[in-house]
Amino acid sequence: MTIASAFAAGVRIRTLVFLFCFNALLYMSFSVLQDDLRALASYHLYSSSSANVTSNVTGSGTIASNIVQTDDSITLAPDLSPEPQISRKANATLVFLARNSDLQGVLKSMESVETHFNQRFGYPWIFLNEDEFTNEFKESVQLKTNASVQFGVIPSRHWYQPDWIDEGKAEQARNALKAAGVIYADSVSYRNMCRFNSGFFFHHPLLQQYRYYWRIEPDVDYFCQLQYDPFDYLEDNNKTYGFTIALEELGQTVTTLWQAVKEFMEQYPEYIHPNNALAFLSDNGGETFNLCHFWSNFEIADMDFWRGEAYTKFFEFLDSKGGFYYERWGDAPIHSIAAALFLDKTQLHFFNDIGYQHSNIMHCPQQPAFLTGSCTCNRVLSIDYRRYSCLPRYNKMLNGKW
Ligand SMILES: Nc1nc2c(ncn2[C@@H]2O[C@H](COP(=O)(O)OP(=O)(O)OP(=O)(O)O)[C@@H](O)[C@H]2O)c(=O)[nH]1
Ligand SMILES: [Mg+2]
């Protein structure tokens, strides 16, 4: 081959490579565009069909004109006028456990929930506390919503450390956790809260008339305008437990929890659902706990599950071990383990389209779900596929894919 023909061949190859790369880029951009268009189309379909199928919200406006560009991506700012008319209301309530001293954080969370959801849906709020709420607390909270608000005092037996707990042993355990630098290690009130949330909130007299609840905590943020009623969604789709964030628990707080769970499973095999989500909790068929759990500061779920026989037995069994006080068992792993074992795994629901932040951990909907509401979060910062997130395990358990 002469130098000239070698050169010409080289140019041809470089041209071919360039053309190939250019086409590949074009194809990729087109695919992304197609995804976005598909998401837009399904959003539009959902908006109009929700009026007919679930009859919960009507009145969503034009979509295309509402696309806005934000830092990292396009998001939708749905036109919510005219005011959606709610022709159906679930048997549900927003539940808020709080202290009087939490007031500022409570108001912040209420503002976020009202703005992104409840102003349009009007679900009642219930506030619970082991002490009486002050007038200042009650008045301030009532000013934040047009919905009904109720304040309840928690019965002492549902809150305080039971007499049968060996306080000496509990104190030693608290000190040991404190020495290990574990958050809330030496707090008895935190343990009371975890035990109450695990086994009692759904028995409070104010909650008896309700089936579904949405748990809210102080200082949380919501980022997306919710275009549908999540309670109706659970009911219509036979879902029982909804979450937005799944994480690994601190191992030191649940040292003997899985041993207790295994004992329970042996003793009551009848409660374990044949199509359960054990694979979310354990990477070795149940031998050990991988610490994955749904983060319970956000929960939209069915209280009839907690009130049912399996969970009642489960809570009583665990409570009798004393682990709420001898360790620092949280309501999040307790709820999660029960939901994963006693329900059909299809009864769990990842509320991907609810953008949510608690402390410094945030879930922001990923494409295409982020297009279904106007989300103000940055999805690049979402915890979903970062370290300590158990969402990949959840996906794997449900669909076989991480
Ligand atoms: N009434 C009452 N509520 C409490 C008490 N401790 C915690 N709570 C509430 O229980 C929920 C969980 O408590 P948090 O302190 O938020 O616990 P956490 O979410 O694990 O930790 P943070 O990162 O501090 O938010 C919140 O709604 C609190 O307001 C308490 O002693 N009394
Ligand atoms: Mg909290």
Image: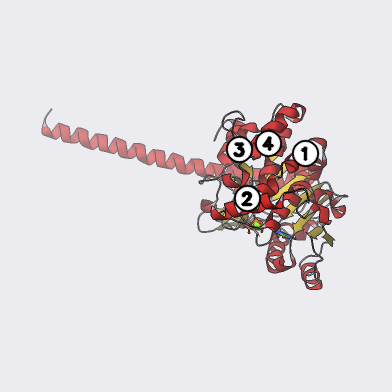
**Residue type of the residue flagged with mark 1:** Tyr
Distance (Cα) linking label 3 and label 1? 21 Å
Nearer the observer, disc 4 or disc 1?
4
Residue drawn at 69 percent across, 43 percent down: 334
Is the C-beta separation of discs 3 and 2 under 8 Å?
Answer: no
Name the quarter where the N terminus is drawn.
top left
Residue assigned mark 2: 173
Ligand 1, image quadrant it occupies:
bottom right
Distance (Cα) linking label 1 and label 2? 27 Å
Image position of 165 with respect to 313: above or below: below
**Residue type of the residue flagged with mark 4:** Ala
Distance (Cα) linking label 3 and label 2? 32 Å
Q: Identify the coloring.
A: secondary structure
Q: Quadrant of residue 275?
A: top right
Image position of 120 with respect to 291: above or below: below
Q: Earlier in the sequence, mark 3 or mark 1?
A: 1
Residue assigned mark 3: 394
Residue assigned mark 4: 260
**Residue type of the residue flagged with mark 3:** Tyr
Residue 351: percent from left, percent from top: 66, 46
Check the image and name the residue furthest to the bottom.
136
Residue assigned mark 1: 311
| Horizontal side of residue 338 vs 360, given as left or right | right
Q: Earlier in the sequence, mark 2 or mark 4?
A: 2
Image position of 74 with respect to 288: above or below: below
**Residue type of the residue flagged with mark 2:** Ala
- Tally of marks: 4
* SS of the residue under disc 3: helix
Q: Is residue 273 visible?
A: no
Q: Is residue 220 visible?
A: yes
